[in-house]
Amino acid sequence: MSSLSRELVFLILQFLEEEKFKETVHKLEQESGFFFNMKYFEDEVHNGNWDEVERYLSGFTKVDDNRYSMKIFFEIRKQKYLEALDKHDRSKAVEILVKDLKVFSTFNEDLFKEITQLLTLENFRENEQLSKYGDTKSARAIMLIELKKLIEANPLFRDKLQFPNLKNSRLRTLINQSLNWQHQLCKNPRPNPDIKTLFVDHSCGQPNGARAPSPANNPLLGSLPKAGGFPPLGAHGPFQPTTAPVPTPLAGWMSNPTTVAHPAVSGGGAIGLGAPSISAALKHPRTPPTNPSVDYPSGDSDHVSKRPRPMGMPDEVNLPVNVLSAALPGHGHSQSFNPPDDLPKTVTRTLNQGSSPMSMDFHPVQQSLLLVGTIVGDISLWEVGSRERLVSKNFKVWDLSACSMPLQTSLVKDPSVSVNRVIWSPDGALFGVAYSRHIVQIYSYHGGDDVRQHLEIDAHLGGVNDLAFSHPNKQLCVITCGDDKTIKVWDAATGTKQFTFEGHEAPVYSVCPHYKENIQFIFSTALDGKIKAWLYDNLGSRVDYDAPGRWCTTMAYSADGTRLFSCGTSKDGESSIVEWNESEGAVKRTYQGFRKRSMGVVQFDTTKNRFLAAGDDFSIKFWEMDNVQLLTTIDADGGLPASPRIRFNKDGTLLAVSANENGIKILANADGIRFLRTLENSAYEASRTSEAIKPTLNPISAAASSAALAERGSSVVAIAGMNGDARNMGDVKPRIAEESNDKSKIWKLTEINEPSQCRSLKLPENLRVTKISRLIYTNSGNAILALSSDAIHLLWKWQRSDRNSSGKATASVSPHLWQPSSGILMTNDISDSNPEDAVPCFALSKNDSYVMSASGGKISLFNMMTFKTMTTFMPPPPAATFLAFHPQDNNVIAIGMDDSTIQIYNVRVDEVKSKLKGHTKRITGLAFSHPLNVLVSSGADAQLCVWNTDGWEKQRSKFLQIPAGRTPTAQAETRVQFHQDQMHFLVVHETQLAMYETTKLECLKQWFPRDSTAPISAATFSCDSQLIYASFLDATVYVFSASNLRLCCRINPSSYLSAGVSSKVQPLVVAAHPQEPNQFALGLSDGGVHVFEPLESEGKWGVPPIENGSASNVIATSAGVSSDQAQR
């Protein structure tokens, strides 16, 4: 159905509601599936109209659509069952059990048995988990809370929970306008036409010479309703119009600007900028979490193909659910039953800053680097992993003679200065410091303790209250605001002032740059409580709102850029956090739980698109974004000030909190604790190497790159940023010659020849397939998915047991080859051509719910829970040869084709957005780096291409350096995979392994097998990017140190294959466990899959460097190239 047809349905729904066609309204809602009326649903649940509840739901979802839908139907049917038991209606209960609940037994048989056993109890409350079950009314109310959360999280209900904001009687108004227009076209218009029908076009009768009346003052269908003139619309609350005067919506002013100047607007009246509002676009902005102000142009291309069938992919959602305290298995939900567990609440570090912290910010890439500014003007850079202060600088004006006389005079009178704000640039190459006296200082960061002066700007008269970076017109800018009531925009490279925004009547307290679609803008707040918005032009403020509290207010978007929040404190100490409805310019929700009188200005932060946090009442308070009630409070073991300063790192795994006595506490969740532990281990390993590799850096390159923490790591690509979604690490170029000459500490090669020397497990084969073509661990780490050459998918799942308490994949416990009770297989569409000529490929969604897969035919989308084929698309030719999900949008996939093109496809709208041309043979590898906004592709032509994901232009390309004497096969695959730092990537080719730096496409390191060695069949990073697992066509597996491509372990085929088959079987694919860095799996040419782990007594592959070892075990390196001549 087209967009306009969909909107017509909404207009009809509004009309039916106004005309009181109650049953028809809800029938149309259900049949169209466009609007889920939560109020009606709540009423039916409260009334126990279970048949109607399920009938209404059926218009939007079915029980087996996804795990949220399954949980919704389960909760409803469980409640119906319990109510029957409570009435002692056993026959009804048995009917519900058999008819409604048995469907869930295939997913959790134990749970179904437990439910069945309730029939044997006189009172089901004797069951411990149901002991708190109250009366029917309260039980329904409690269940409804759970159902609402599930519905809001269910991707199938996206955009169906909010009714469009329509004026009253919008359909009548449109008909009036149409009739007025028809009347104007009459050849002989009457002054008072008599409209008797809408079935045919209006036409006046006999001529009388009268002119057509103005449509504005002569409506033809009677009086049009005035705003607010109709009574409330009951269940359709969203239908109600906003009563006049209406504030300008936050979205409404962000249309394409005209050339006419617009004054600041206060209060009512919409601002029309000559183009339609983009409020619809605001609901799905393309703002990346790590770079909220980069301009992303639309992906125009030379080929745009549309198909009539839209189909959407859900985003990843974590939601706490509870099914009799037991989860349906395989749904990936057990880790998020307790929301506070996702929060960093364990104190892992306490740093002594020396003076009171005023502002803090974590590095966007190296997320253990914390920048701190203090009340006495000092700045420090901490490596929280090692607790080391890398940089400490006291306040000093770099060039006093270049400063204005007011600044010079004020510094003479009172030299004391405080830091108001410190912040990193989006890529971490720069950081800015805003001081309480006039100036802003911009430093460039070059890794380790290398911090250099870049710009000093005499920005404002009085204090500079806030500082931010933005990227309008693809040019990095610095935005400042100050006591002089202005906002200014500066070129980050030269310090040239580009814009000055005037219009506030009080000192400007904060700025918040952002963008929606292609429109860049800045929110600003002032100490009189006014919020204004500015485009990058000289046309004045676009909106004027009053912030709650009307004093110190800061604003922030959620990480995905879709939700806007503000936090403020009034002069009386009243603090609040609110979420704004951008389409209406009004407060959407106000969060509760603040102290009545905050002692200081409350600071807040957001994380994971899910949580809000604020420092208040000597503690940190947390809220879930969708719940106004306080989620939890953490005192960080005490010792916090009344209103502590707080700052999350980008992944939300660490939280820095200012403490009393000039301290800073670092709080971590489970992932953060592992992250810090990994850093400690890396630092320990690095301390045992003879020399840390120094990077060279172009300080502010075109990509504004920043270097790795090279001072404390032996890695060519430093592993300081351990969390996968990181930002630009920069132009890291190791001094390989020096490294190769250092033989004081070298790796001792470990040879594994016997099964007893490692843990290996061949996975069970209930289903005989040919060779394994593709292999991957699920993101949860508890299953392995394989795709065979005959287009069949195999899924092995590990279960929790006494021998495997975590339920994760392991070589110590055998999994089972899983299939749904229906017995269906996930089988790809196969083309008419020879199946052996097909190139199988697949990609797994981040929450393991869906797999997109192809084997030479159409691309199929499978539900991983039911194995059902959700849809197929893109029939060949050309055939898909590689698939990759966009890291920020599960609806966008890059599809490599056998005709050498790459298609950027939006699943939701079923449209190819761009078609990329640059290769000459089929595509064999694709990898995204979100921090760099690039897609790296590789092909059978042995070429690498780097594409900008903003406009999908090709930035660079380079052919692999094939070693002399090695002639690759005609269709040799070239694979690419990003390092965890997201700045470097591994290239795998049958002739070599290579490490590349992305921004310059520079080869940093290569490893070539000897001529007598079998070709490389596959290779992959370990989950922490410290190791590389490589398989060869002679069935040997090598384990390399990723930092220098040194071989540390060789696993020979005799350790896992019997003598009779070792010469016939080849490993074709290798996959690494997503959480266990020392576990990997091989897919073999005989259809087998083997999982490998080192012996528990050893814990890792290979032996760490030893003193004065034999040089025979060192991989020779020269000019960045290594070979295995020393090993073989």
Image (cartoon, rainbow, N blue to C red):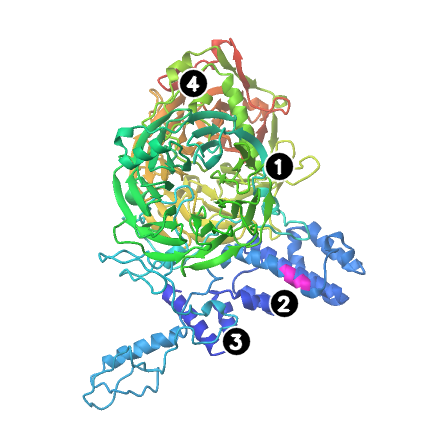
Task: Look at the picture and state if 76 lies above or below 222.
Answer: above
Q: Earlier in the sequence, mark 4 or mark 2?
A: 2
Q: Whole-Å distance between the Cαs marked 1 and 4?
A: 62 Å
- Category of crowding for the residue at label 4, using alpha-carbon neighbours closer than 10 angstroms: few (below 14), some (14–19), many (at least 20): few
Instruction: Give the quarter of the image for residue 266.
Output: bottom left
The spot of residue 934 in percent (x, y) is 36, 39
Q: Which residues are magenta?
A: 138-143
- Mark 3 or mark 4: whose residue is earlier in sequence: 3
What type of secondary structure mainly makes up the magenta span?
Answer: helix
Q: Decide whether residue 141 is among the magenta residues.
A: yes
Res. 32 visible in picture = yes
Which residue appears farthest toward the front when viewing the image? 413
Q: What SS does tag 2 mark?
A: helix
In the image, taking residue 317 as reference, residue 583 lies left or right, namely left
Q: Which residue is mark 2?
A: 46
**Distance from Cα at disc 1 to Cα at disc 3:** 56 Å
The disc labelled 2 sits on which kind of residue?
A: His
- Nearest to viewer (mark 1 / mark 2): 1
Disc 3 is placed on an element classified as: helix
Residue at figure coordinates x 41%, y 32% from the top left: 377
**Which element is circle 1 on?**
loop
Q: Which residue is mark 3?
A: 22
Q: Nearer the viewer, residue 996 or 594?
A: 594
- Please give the residue where the numbered disc 4 appears in the rendered image: 1012
For residue 637, the mark is 1
